Amino acid sequence: MAKYEARIKAIFGEIVVGFNSIDELKANVESLDAQAVSEVVLKKFESFITKEPRQPKHGLEDVYRFTPSGLVEIMRLPPSKAETVALVLFAYHPEPALIEQIVFSTGIRDVASRYLTNTAYKRFFSKVQGGRYMLSQEGFDSVCTKILPKIMTKASPTAGSGVEAVRNEVGRDPGAGKWMF
């Protein structure tokens, strides 16, 4: 029986490595093929493993959240559908989203033709590898400067602090992009 345990959080749970000395810990860790362990466990218990839902950006916890399946759930809808699409992509940022994720999160079935590739809006969106979409720089800036202030001030007089938190988290003050809705 090992005297000590090192507990390492993994995407599938926790790996426990027993050891009696630092040298033994080093040897045990070196001999462990973490990738192989992960693949075996995930393959066998995929339907049982619950992932921690992704957290919203700081200060926007009451604007959107992630479901356990990884979809965005908007809790404060912007006034237009195009702004809703942009907010969903903002939530997924910096990761791009599949059309299906955007459809399920917005409820807009023809989201690609009506917004993502529509000439009136496409400058706000970028199609990236694998048919995924994300906000362009102009789109990201517009969400920060136009959409978030609009929906944050609707609900609470102190909600504007969330927009500042996002600007600080991103590390810059976005420019003044314009949404033409």
Image: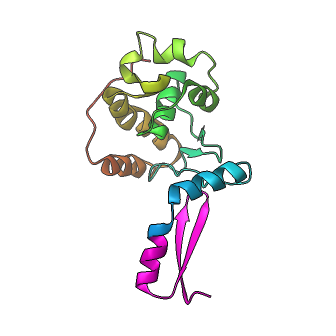
Compared across the picture, whether 100 is left or right of 127 comes to right
Name the colour scheme: rainbow
Side of 153 relative to 108 (left or right): left
Quadrant position of residue 125: top left
Q: Position of residue 55 (x, y in %)?
A: 52, 52
Q: Nearer the viewer, residue 34 or 27?
A: 27
In magenta segment, residue 28: yes
Name, please, the residue furthest toward the right: 48
Nearest the viewer among 39 and 173 is: 39
- Image vertical order of residue 124 relative to residue 6, above or below: above
Q: How many marks?
A: 0
Task: From the top left corner, tell me how far across and down residue 111 is, in percent.
Answer: 56, 18
Q: Position of residue 151 (x, y in %)?
A: 49, 38
Looking at the image, residue 135 sits to the left or right of residue 132; the answer is: left
Q: Quadrant of the N terminus?
A: bottom right
- In the image, residue 155 sits, relative to residue 158, either above or below, namely above
Q: Is residue 125 magenta?
A: no
Tell me the residue at 30%/27% (across/down): 177
Q: Residue at x 58, y 58 (%)?
A: 37
Quarter of the C terminus within the rendering: top left
Residue stretch rendered in magenta on the structure: 1-29
Residue at coordinates 56% horizontally, 55% vertically from top-left?
36
Left or right placement of residue 150 versus residue 136 in this view: right
The answer to whether 12 is drawn above or below residue 21 in the figure is above
Question: Which of the two residues, 92 or 74, is positioned nearer the viewer here?
Answer: 92
Outermost top residue: 119
Residue 166 in percent (x, y) is at 37, 47
